[in-house]
Image (cartoon, coloured by chain):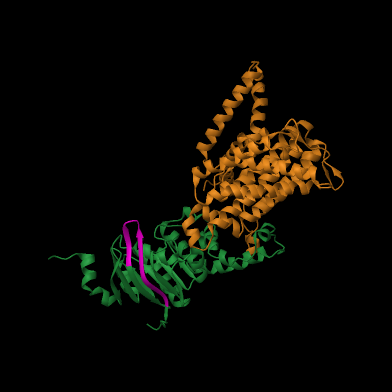
Amino acid sequence: MSKKIGDVILDVQNISLRFGGVKALTDISFNVREREIRSIIGPNGAGKSSMLNCINGVYQPQEGSIVFRGQTFSQMNSRQVAEMGIARTFQNLALFKGMSVVDNIMTGRNLRIKSNLFMQAIRNPFGIGGAQREEEQHREFVEHIIDFLEIQAYRKTPVGQLSYGLQKRVDLGRALAMEPKVLLLDEPMAGMNLEEKQDMSRFILDVNDEFGTTVVLIEHDMGVVMDISDRVVVLDYGRKIGDGTPEEVRSNDEVIRAYLGTTN
Amino acid sequence: MIYQENGQLKISYRADQQIFPILQDRWAVLAILALAFAGIPMLADEYLFRAILIPFLILSLAAIGVNILVGYCGQISMGSGAFMAVGAYMAYNAYVRIDAMPLIGALLVGGASATLVGMFFGIPSLRVKGLYLAVATLAAQFFCDWAFLRIGWFTNNSSSGSVSVSNLDVLGWTVSSPLEKYLFCLSFVVVFALIAKNLVRSAIGREWMAIRDMDVAATVIGIRPMYAKLSAFAVSSFIVGVAGALWGFVHLGAWEPSAFSIDRSFQLLFMVIIGGMGSIMGSFFGAAFIVVLPIVLSQLVPALGALVGLSISTAAVSHIEAMVFGALIVWFLIVEPHGLAKLWSTGKQKLRVWPFPH
């Protein structure tokens, strides 16, 4: 591979997360390097999504800290995380169902919109107040994403009417609209058929390759994970049981035990 | 065949982002505006203005306000009547207490006061959702009913508890005849409908709808729920407050707190549900349905009775009116749960592909 993997961009240090008496994550540490594709795998309930939610500021871990581009955080707030350039897609589709494809992706640009409520109220085709001009600039960016994801035909369709695979693409598009440095993908290929998985893998590789975006990927399809990841973290019952290249992880005894079970 | 956008190619995002991207729609809107400003004043009589058109316009404005909060931002509110009352009473106070207060200034003071009260009673929305929020906003209704009845300051210590305004005057134009009142209200409705449409199709509108549809995803892309919800309460209450001030000043002339009782809140909520949640156009449909239909029914029932040789008593007419009205609401909600606005857009789609079915 010719791509250049850089320094550590995201460093997760000793994260523990509890819900009452349930330990969702126990002392998890791993790092993500710039421009790499880092996968998190593990059986159901291993704490993969909880891990992303901690990075995202949706959950506040009780212990540990997260270092992003040299800045240390013990408590992340979702707005800060978004402003720093971490975007995210969701395991269960979390699109804005009543809005069109274009509008869904446009919400990803909202952080960059400068015009205030009054300027938006007087939005007009003559460009007075600037809200319309700004709207057009962001629309142009959104159209590039729509082209990239090959969903031109559906841009005005309400997302609720799209097929599952297309909705997953829109979800990715909304995250890409934020021009993230790190993209967290929570099972982007769950429930897809082979062709859709291939398309989605191609999009992920292209994003990584063309835009240099770092990708953190949760996925259950081992074929995909082993193919596209640079390094893999394995979680089981909220603990880290493996970390390394796909080959290292594949031959790790503890990982095999967690996935296949062993006979004694 | 007639209603098609074939050949209307958009070559700029500006053209694609127009409020009415289809040429025929733009002509239709211009025709409706021309009819409203020039045609109706020549055709309608005083009764039509007083009993139908002015209430329809003002309640459409209020429904637009409620729709922003309930339809676009998904925060159910039962305090709309209270916010109308705040608008009416504070506009009244600004008008009688401040010398040389212009009429429009007083109406806007009413709106601004309603904004503050609306944001205050919107604070629970940061913690509670759905029906629980609806119950929490009832507090606004009870509090305002009480305040305007018991606190003398709001009514300028009027002994009867009722207040009245007269001599409405805008820059030398006296708004006194029903026609003038109609044109005054119409101008307000056109301006505010445009502002509301601009907001809901811009960044702030997308934030409201994002919070409505999926609040966790909205948070993760950097939308602050507090800002989105409270701004929806603010904008909504402002518009509802201005509508309340118009209702008091222009439609009623003299009023007491019962004009803005909880019935009014329910009426506005029904308008939004029947008209179409999340649609500015639907607010007009909903207001027309609730305001105009009972009057049409009360005229139609005796006429139909006469046709088959029956004379129907006044009491029976009002019973039949209530029954048919209730049945129609149920029927419409079963046929199209997304409201009249959805029926309208389905109809437009059918017209677009006519004479083919798909």
Is B40 rendered above or below residue A60? Answer: above
Is B321 rendered above or below residue A126? Answer: above
Colour green maps to chain: A
Q: How many marks?
A: 0
Where is residue A221 drawn, in percent x and y? Answer: 31, 66
Identify the residue shown where x is 81% and y is 48%: B102
Q: Quadrant of the N terminus of chain A?
A: bottom left
Q: Is residue A15 magenta?
A: yes
Colour applied to chain B = orange
Q: Is residue B124 found left or right of B238 in the rendered image?
A: left
Predominant SS of the magenta segment: strand
Q: Nearer the viewer, residue A50 or B343?
A: A50
Identify the residue shown where x is 56% and y is 34%: B329
Q: Nearer the viewer, residue A181 or B158?
A: B158
Q: Tell me if I can see residue B185 in this picture.
A: no
Identify the residue shown where x is 27% and y is 74%: A249
Q: Quadrant of residue B264?
A: top right
Q: Nearer the viewer, residue B103 or A219?
A: B103
Q: Is residue A68 magenta?
A: no
Q: Is residue B72 found left or right of B38 in the rendered image?
A: left
Where is residue A194 drawn, in percent x and y? Answer: 34, 64
Q: Quadrant of the C terminus of chain A?
A: bottom left
Where is residue A261 drawn, in percent x and y? Answer: 19, 64
Q: Quadrant of residue B284?
A: top right
Is A6 rendered above or below residue A49? Answer: below
Magenta stretch: give its range: A9-26
Q: Is residue B249 found left or right of B226 in the rendered image?
A: right
Q: Residue furthest right?
A: B172
Where is residue A60 drawn, in percent x and y? Answer: 42, 63
Q: Tell me if I can see residue B264 in this picture.
A: yes
